[in-house]
Amino acid sequence: MIRRRRRDELGDINLLEITPVRTADWEEHGGRVVVLRPAPTGGGMRVVLNRFFFLLSARKIKLDEIGSFVWLQLDGQQTVAEVAQKLGDEFGDRVKPPEERLGYLVRVFRREELVGYAGWDDSAERTEAARCLSD
Protein backbone atom coordinates (compact mmCIF):
# COMPACT_ATOMS: atom_id res chain seq x y z
CA MET A 1 0.00 0.00 0.00
CA ILE A 2 1.35 3.39 -0.99
CA ARG A 3 1.22 5.84 1.88
CA ARG A 4 0.63 9.44 0.87
CA ARG A 5 2.97 11.73 2.79
CA ARG A 6 2.37 15.40 3.34
CA ARG A 7 4.66 17.88 1.62
CA ASP A 8 5.52 19.60 4.90
CA GLU A 9 7.13 16.39 6.19
CA LEU A 10 10.02 17.06 3.81
CA GLY A 11 11.11 20.05 5.86
CA ASP A 12 13.20 17.82 8.13
CA ILE A 13 14.68 15.71 5.31
CA ASN A 14 18.15 16.25 3.88
CA LEU A 15 17.55 16.96 0.19
CA LEU A 16 20.97 15.49 -0.67
CA GLU A 17 19.76 12.03 0.38
CA ILE A 18 16.62 12.03 -1.79
CA THR A 19 16.44 10.27 -5.16
CA PRO A 20 14.40 12.35 -7.64
CA VAL A 21 12.51 10.61 -10.45
CA ARG A 22 11.40 12.35 -13.65
CA THR A 23 7.60 12.23 -13.99
CA ALA A 24 7.23 14.39 -17.11
CA ASP A 25 7.99 13.61 -20.74
CA TRP A 26 10.77 15.46 -22.51
CA GLU A 27 12.52 15.88 -25.85
CA GLU A 28 16.14 16.58 -26.70
CA HIS A 29 16.99 19.19 -29.30
CA GLY A 30 20.66 19.83 -30.03
CA GLY A 31 21.83 18.66 -26.62
CA ARG A 32 19.23 20.74 -24.78
CA VAL A 33 16.19 19.32 -23.03
CA VAL A 34 12.65 20.56 -23.56
CA VAL A 35 10.33 19.34 -20.80
CA LEU A 36 6.66 18.85 -21.67
CA ARG A 37 4.53 20.03 -18.75
CA PRO A 38 1.86 17.51 -17.78
CA ALA A 39 -1.73 18.71 -17.64
CA PRO A 40 -3.23 18.88 -14.13
CA THR A 41 -5.35 15.92 -13.11
CA GLY A 42 -7.99 15.26 -10.49
CA GLY A 43 -11.34 16.83 -9.77
CA GLY A 44 -12.92 19.71 -7.95
CA MET A 45 -12.63 23.47 -8.12
CA ARG A 46 -8.88 23.54 -7.48
CA VAL A 47 -8.24 21.44 -10.58
CA VAL A 48 -10.47 23.71 -12.66
CA LEU A 49 -8.34 26.63 -11.56
CA ASN A 50 -5.13 24.68 -12.19
CA ARG A 51 -6.29 23.76 -15.70
CA PHE A 52 -7.13 27.39 -16.43
CA PHE A 53 -3.64 28.49 -15.41
CA PHE A 54 -2.15 25.55 -17.31
CA LEU A 55 -3.81 26.78 -20.51
CA LEU A 56 -2.34 30.26 -19.96
CA SER A 57 1.20 29.07 -19.25
CA ALA A 58 3.94 27.60 -21.43
CA ARG A 59 3.47 23.90 -22.14
CA LYS A 60 7.13 23.37 -23.01
CA ILE A 61 9.96 24.34 -20.70
CA LYS A 62 13.29 24.87 -22.46
CA LEU A 63 16.21 24.16 -20.15
CA ASP A 64 19.65 25.71 -20.44
CA GLU A 65 22.85 23.67 -20.58
CA ILE A 66 23.03 23.17 -16.81
CA GLY A 67 19.32 22.43 -16.44
CA SER A 68 19.52 19.91 -19.29
CA PHE A 69 22.47 18.16 -17.66
CA VAL A 70 20.62 17.97 -14.34
CA TRP A 71 17.41 16.74 -15.97
CA LEU A 72 19.19 13.86 -17.68
CA GLN A 73 20.83 12.85 -14.38
CA LEU A 74 17.51 12.64 -12.49
CA ASP A 75 16.90 9.04 -13.49
CA GLY A 76 15.69 7.68 -10.15
CA GLN A 77 18.97 5.84 -9.62
CA GLN A 78 21.11 8.66 -8.19
CA THR A 79 20.70 10.76 -5.07
CA VAL A 80 20.86 14.55 -5.23
CA ALA A 81 24.34 14.37 -3.63
CA GLU A 82 25.61 12.12 -6.44
CA VAL A 83 24.15 14.40 -9.10
CA ALA A 84 25.67 17.44 -7.34
CA GLN A 85 29.11 15.80 -7.52
CA LYS A 86 28.70 15.19 -11.26
CA LEU A 87 27.40 18.72 -11.76
CA GLY A 88 30.46 20.18 -10.03
CA ASP A 89 32.79 17.95 -12.05
CA GLU A 90 31.11 18.88 -15.35
CA PHE A 91 30.69 22.65 -14.91
CA GLY A 92 33.28 23.57 -12.26
CA ASP A 93 33.20 27.23 -11.19
CA ARG A 94 30.04 27.98 -13.17
CA VAL A 95 27.92 26.24 -10.52
CA LYS A 96 29.73 26.99 -7.26
CA PRO A 97 28.46 25.55 -4.94
CA PRO A 98 26.78 22.82 -7.00
CA GLU A 99 24.58 21.65 -4.10
CA GLU A 100 22.79 25.01 -3.90
CA ARG A 101 22.24 25.27 -7.65
CA LEU A 102 21.02 21.68 -7.86
CA GLY A 103 18.81 22.05 -4.79
CA TYR A 104 17.10 25.05 -6.35
CA LEU A 105 16.52 23.21 -9.66
CA VAL A 106 15.18 20.07 -7.99
CA ARG A 107 12.78 22.07 -5.80
CA VAL A 108 11.49 23.98 -8.86
CA PHE A 109 11.09 20.75 -10.83
CA ARG A 110 9.09 19.23 -7.97
CA ARG A 111 6.93 22.32 -7.48
CA GLU A 112 6.07 22.20 -11.20
CA GLU A 113 5.35 18.44 -10.81
CA LEU A 114 8.09 17.49 -13.28
CA VAL A 115 9.88 15.23 -10.79
CA GLY A 116 8.85 13.32 -7.72
CA TYR A 117 10.83 12.00 -4.80
CA ALA A 118 10.92 8.21 -4.73
CA GLY A 119 9.48 7.06 -1.42
CA TRP A 120 7.71 10.39 -0.83
CA ASP A 121 5.51 11.14 -3.83
CA ASP A 122 2.90 8.76 -5.18
CA SER A 123 3.64 9.89 -8.75
CA ALA A 124 7.33 9.03 -8.39
CA GLU A 125 6.46 5.59 -7.05
CA ARG A 126 4.03 4.97 -9.92
CA THR A 127 6.67 6.08 -12.44
CA GLU A 128 9.28 3.81 -10.86
CA ALA A 129 6.83 0.86 -10.81
CA ALA A 130 5.97 1.42 -14.48
CA ARG A 131 9.67 1.53 -15.35
CA CYS A 132 10.27 -1.78 -13.54
CA LEU A 133 7.36 -3.41 -15.38
CA SER A 134 8.64 -2.24 -18.78
CA ASP A 135 12.18 -3.57 -18.20
Image (spheres, grey):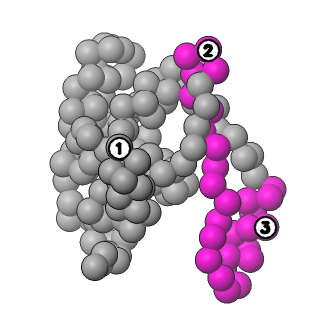
- The residue that disc 1 covers is 135
In the rendered image, residue 94, in percent from the top left (x then y), is placed at: 39, 16
Q: Are marks 3 and 2 in contact (CB under 8 Å)?
A: no
Magenta-drawn stretch contains 128: no
Query: Which one is in front, 94 or 47?
Result: 47
Element at label 3: helix
Q: Which mark is residue 95?
A: none
Observer-side mark, 2 or 1, equals 1
How far from the left and from the top, in percent, is residue 118?
Answer: 30, 57
Which numbered disc, 3 or 1, marks the residue that appears first in the sequence?
Answer: 3
How far apart marks 3 and 1 lie (CA) works out to: 37 Å
Q: Which residue in the protein does label 3 denote? A: 52
Numbered tag placed on residue 30 in the rendering: 2
Crowding at dot 1, Cα within 10 Å, few <14 / some 14-19 / many 20+, comes out as: few
Which amino acid type corresponds to the residue marked 1 in the rendered image?
A: Asp
Q: Nearer the viewer, residue 64 or 118?
A: 118
Q: Quadrant of the C terminus?
A: top left
Q: Which residue type does callout 3 highlight?
A: Phe
First reached walking from the N terminus: tag 2 or tag 1: 2
Q: Which residues are magenta?
A: 29-56
> Given this view, does label 3 or label 2 mark the residue nearer the observer?
2
Answer whether residue 71 is visible to the viewer in this image: yes
Q: Secondary structure at mark 2?
A: loop
Q: Is residue 62 left or right of residue 2?
A: right
> Marks 3 and 2, how far apart in space?
32 Å
In the displayed structure, does residue 48 sit left or right of residue 79? right
First along the sequence among labels 3 and 2: 2
